[in-house]
Image (tube, grey):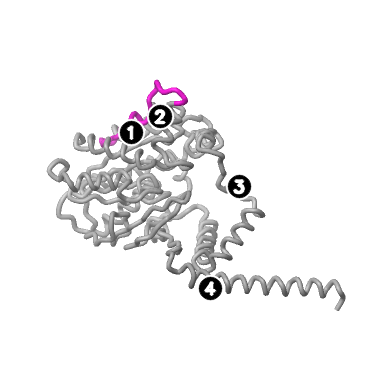
Amino acid sequence: MSIHKKIIFHIILFCIFFIISDFIISFAYTKFIIKDKKFKSEGHGVEHDSFHHHLKKNLETTDIFNKKKYKIITNSLGFRDKKIRNVEYISNGRRLVFIGDSFTFGSLLDYENTFVGKIDKEMSANFDKFKIDEVINMGVPSYTPIIYYHKIKFYIDAGFEFSDLVVFIDISDIQNETVYYYNEDAKNVVAYNEANYHYLKLKRLVVLFLKDNFIASYHILNTINDFVVKNENEVKTFKNEDEYIKFIVSKSHKIDKWTIDKDVYSEYSSGIKSALKYMKLLKSLCEKNNIKLTVAVYPWATQIYHKDLESKQVSIWKDFSETNNVNFMNLFPIFINLKDNQNDIRKKIKKYYSPYDVHFNKKGNELISNFFLKEYNNFK
C-alpha cells in the first residue's frame, strides 16, 4: 500500500473512530448528566387523516423561542387548553369554538396569556354576562380556510356539539391557501408538494432524535450545518429590534404584502378565491347545524406600519360577512391610528408584537381579548 493510500486510510479510520466516540460520549452525557434537566424537545404536532395536521392529545410540553419558554397543553381531543382534561362531544350548554392559525393558537405564549385563554377565563368567571358554558381553541399553526372547513366538518360529523364559532382569519392565510388542496379520492386535505413535506417531516424527526439522545453531537452537527449549508429559508439575524421591524415591513418579507402591493395581490389571487370558497362552505355548514358564525380580522405589523386601515383584508371579509349574513369583527382600528407618526408606529409594534417575531405578545393578545369581550354580546 502506497504512503498516500495509508494516509487516506488512517484519516478515514480516525474519522470513523471520532464519530463513534462522539456519539457514545454524547449519548452518555445526554442520558446520565442532563437527564434531570428535562431538556427533551417533544414535538406537539401530528398528521391527521382528514384535515392534514393537528395537535397531540393530552400533551404537556415546553417550547423555546429566543431563550423564552412557553407551555403547550392539550386536552383529550387535541385542542390547546389550560390543562389536560377530558372534553365531551356532547355539550350541555353553549360552547364557543375558536379556530385560526398560529395567532389563534397563541404561539410563543402560555395559554392564559393568549387572547383565547383570556376570553376563556373571563367568560368562565362571568357566565351571567356571556352565557357561554365552555370555550374551545381549535387553532393550530399553518391552518387556512380549507383546513378550517374540513376540521370543523370532521368534528361535527363525529358528533362534537357547539353553538358558536369564531374564525380569526389571518393575513398569511391567503398565501398559505395555495399550499393545500382537497384530495377527492382519499377524502383528505394534503399539501401540494407532499414529497417535500415528508422529507421535512423526516428531517425534523432526525433532528429531534439527535437533540434528545445525542445533545453534544447535535450541537456539533448543527454548527457545521450553519457554517457550510446555505439555506435560502434560513432565519435572518438582526442587530436590534428596529432592524427587524424595518425588514418585516419591507418588500423583502412578502407573505403579508398582498394587502398593500398590487403585484403580490395579483400573485395571490388564487389563494383569495380558494379562501372565499371554503369560507362559504363553512358558512353553509354552520347554518345547517344552527351554529352562530363570526369572522374576525386583525393586522400584522406591516398593516400598522403602512397605516393600512381600509385594508383589502378588511374589505374582502367584511363584504363576505355582509353578503352571507355573518357577524364581522374588525380589529384593525384598535391597532391603527392614521395620526400616528413613524416613531409612534415603531413603539406600537414593539408594544403589541413579540420581539423578532410576527405574532402578538401578551399585551397584543390582551388588547384583542378586551375588544372581543366588549363586542361579542352585541352580535345577533
In what quadrant of the picture does the N terminus appear? bottom right
Residue indicated by mark 3: 232
In what quadrant of the picture does the C terminus appear? top left
Q: Earlier in the sequence, mark 4 or mark 3?
A: 4
Q: Earlier in the sequence, mark 2 or mark 3?
A: 3
What segment is highlighted magenta in the picture? 323-343
The answer for how far apart the CA atoms under marks 1 and 3 are is 34 Å
The location of residue 271, given as percent across then percent down, is 45, 41
Q: Earlier in the sequence, mark 4 or mark 2?
A: 4
Q: Secondary structure at mark 2?
A: loop
| Label at residue 28 | 4
Q: Secondary structure at mark 1?
A: loop
Q: Earlier in the sequence, mark 2 or mark 1?
A: 2
Observer-side mark, 2 or 1, equals 1
Observer-side mark, 4 or 3, equals 4
Residue indicated by mark 1: 331
- Tell me which amino acid carries mark 2: Ser
The answer for how far apart the CA atoms under marks 2 and 1 are is 11 Å
Image point (26%, 36%), residue name: 327
Pointer 2: residues within 10 angstroms few (<14), some, or many (20+)? some
Residue indicated by mark 2: 311
Q: Secondary structure at mark 4?
A: helix
The answer for how far apart the CA atoms under marks 4 and 1 are is 52 Å
125 part of magenta stretch: no
Pointer 4: residues within 10 angstroms few (<14), some, or many (20+)? some
Observer-side mark, 4 or 1, equals 4
- Tell me which amino acid carries mark 4: Ala
In this picture, residue 22 sits left or right of residue 343? right
